[in-house]
Image (spheres, coloured by chain):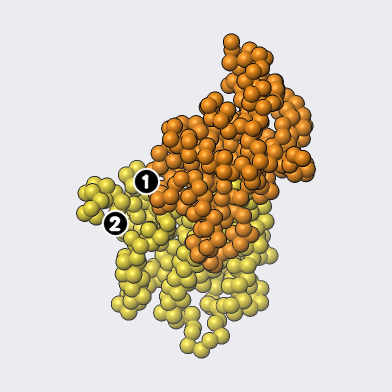
Amino acid sequence: MKINKDIKLSNFFAIILFGALAAFPLMGQDFYNEMVSRILILAIFAIGLDLLVGYTGLVSFGHAAWFGLGAYSFAVLSASYQITNSLWITLAFAILGSALISFMVGLLALRTKGIYFLMVTLAFAQVFYFIVHDVPEIGGSTDGINLYARPLTGISGFDLEDNLVMYYFVFGSLLLSIFLFWMILRSPFGRAIQGIKENEHRMSSIGFNIFGYKLASFVIASMFGSFAGYLFSVLSYGANPELFSWHKSAEVLLMLTLGGIGKFWGGLIGAFAFVVLKEIFMTYTDWWQLWLGLTIIFVVLFLPGGLLSISTRIKLLVGKKYA
Amino acid sequence: MHDVLMKTVNATRHFGGLVANDSVNIEVIKGKTHAVLGPNGAGKSTLINLLSGDLLCTSGNVFFRGNDITTLQPAMRSRLGVGRSYQKTNIFPRFTVLENCRLAAQSRDQRAFSLMSNASAYRSYLEVAEKAIFDTGLSGHEYRLASELSHGEQRQLELAIVLCTNPSVLLLDEPLAGMGSEESMTMIELLRRLVPTHGILMVEHDMDAVFAIADVITVMVNGTVLMTDTPEAVKASSEVQQAYFGH
C-alpha cells in the first residue's frame, strides 16, 4: 500500500527522468556521460543498501565490502589471473561469489543488533580491505589492479569498449535493478522484511523466522552491491582497495540519507544529489567536503525524510487539497 | 474427556532473586475459557509469557498437545498453533488494517519466501484477513492505517492479527483493557463464538467480563496458584476474598 502510493506519486517524474537519461548521450557531452554512468552505478549500490537499511531496518556500515568484491571479481579474473574475459562468466562469478560470502558473513553478523551490527559489518569490510591491500596473490596493493580491456559480451555490435554502448549497458542495468527492487518489495518476502522493520517482535510472535528473512535480505543487498561494483570496475578500467573502504560505506549511507531512506526512489535521487553536489562544490571551492557536509547536515535537520520528502513537506504547508 | 491443548508443569521463572512464577500448573482446554486473576505482581503476565515463549522457564515444563515445547522460541510456538495478544497493543502502526492481517495470514505459508510474485495477489491470505477483520468488527476500516485507529479498534486489530495465524490456543493478555462497554460486548461475543473450536486463556481485570465468560478461573498470588476452580467456587472462596479482594 505504502509502496504503491510512493510509486504512483513519483511515476510521472520517473518517466521524465528515465527519458532524459535515455536521451542524455545524444547530447554529445562525453565527459558528463561517464559521470552520469557513475551516478547510475552508485544508484544500484544505494538501492541494494536501502533494501537492508530502509526496508529491513538493518543499518550496515560495511556495504562497500560487496561493491569492492564485485569490482575485484572482474579485475582478478580478467587481469590478475587472465582466466576469462567473458562478461557473462565474470558477472555471474561476482554476483554469486558475493552471495556466498555475504551468506557466511550474515550468519555471524546478524546475531547482533543495532550499533553492534553496524560495527561487525564495518569490521568485516575492513578485513576485506586489508586483504586486497596486503595480499599480493590476489593482486593486493595500494594501487589496486589496472584493467586494459572491458569484458567481452560475445555478441556482435554489443561492444562495451564503445562508451555509448557502455552507457546504455549501465542504464539497462539500473532499470533491471529498479525492476527487481520493485518486484521484491511487493512480494510476500518484501512484505515480511518491511514487517520486521516495523515491528520485529510482533513478526516473531506471529511465527516468522526473523533470522532467515534478515539473512536473505542481507544476501540480496550484497548482490546488488556486487553488481554495482562490477560495473564500476568495468567503467573505470580498474579496481582498488578504496572501493572496500569505510568511506565508501559511509558515502552510500549518506546518499540514502540525502535521497530518503526507505523511499522507493531514495537511492537513485540520493546518488544524483550526492555526486552532483560534490562536483559543484569541487568546481567552486577547495573545501568541497566542508560544504557537502554542511549540506547533508542541513538536509538531515530540515528534511529528515530526505529530498524525496519535499513533496510531503509542501503538501503540509499548502494543505492537501492544493497539492 | 478433557482435550488439553496446552499445559504447564511446575513452571517456574526467576528474575534474579524474584520468583515471578513458582511451580505453576495450569491447563488450557479446548472449548473452555480459562481466566487468570490476581493482584498486580501476581505473575499473570509472566505466566502468559512462559506459555507463548516470550520468556523461557527457569525450571519446569510447558507442553502443547502433549509435546514438550519448554525451550521453543515464540515463532515456533506460533507455527504450532499458539496465538497470543499483548496487553500493550503490539501492531504494525504504519501499515493498513488489511496489511496487518494479511501479513499475519502470510505467516502460515511457506511461499512467504517467494521473491517474484505479488503478495496482494494471494487470494488465500486476503480471505483469511477479511474474515478476521469481519469477526473482530473492523469491517470498513480495512484501508485505514493501524496508527489512526482508536484505542479500542487497535485492541480489536490486536486480536484480528492473532486470529489470522489460525491458532488453536489463544493467550489473551487483558483483551478488554481500555475498551468502551460496547466494544467490550462485541469482544466478549466474539470470544464466545471462538471458544468451541479454541482453548482460551485470558488475563483480565474486568470482573464482570471474567465472570460472564470464564468456565474456569485460576487465582494467582505472589507467583503461585492460589486456587483453580469454577467461577462460582472462586467467588465463594474466603481464601480468595482474603487474598485478592482484600476483605
**Residue B156 percent coordinates (x, y):** 48, 41
Name the amino acid type tagged 2: Tyr
Residue B178 is left or right of residue A282, and the answer is right
Residue that extends furthest to the bottom in the rendered view of this protein:
A156
**Is A264 left or right of A109, judged from the image as shown?**
left
Under tag 2, what secondary structure? helix
Q: Position of residue B54 (x, y in %)?
A: 64, 37
| Residue B21, label in figure | none
Q: Nearer the viewer, residue A247 or A167?
A: A167
Q: Where residue B127 appears, x then y in whole percent?
A: 52, 58
Write the residue at 56% across / 54% down.
Answer: B105
Mark yes or no: residue A192 visible: no
Q: Label for residue A284?
A: 2
The amino acid at mark 1 is Pro
> What colour do you see for chain B?
orange
Q: Give the residue number, with chain letter if any, for mark 1.
A: A304
Residue A312 visible in rendering: yes
Task: Please state which of residues A102 and A294 is positioned toward the viewer in this rendering.
Answer: A102
The tint chain A carries is yellow
The answer as to whether the residues below labels 1 and 2 share one chain is yes
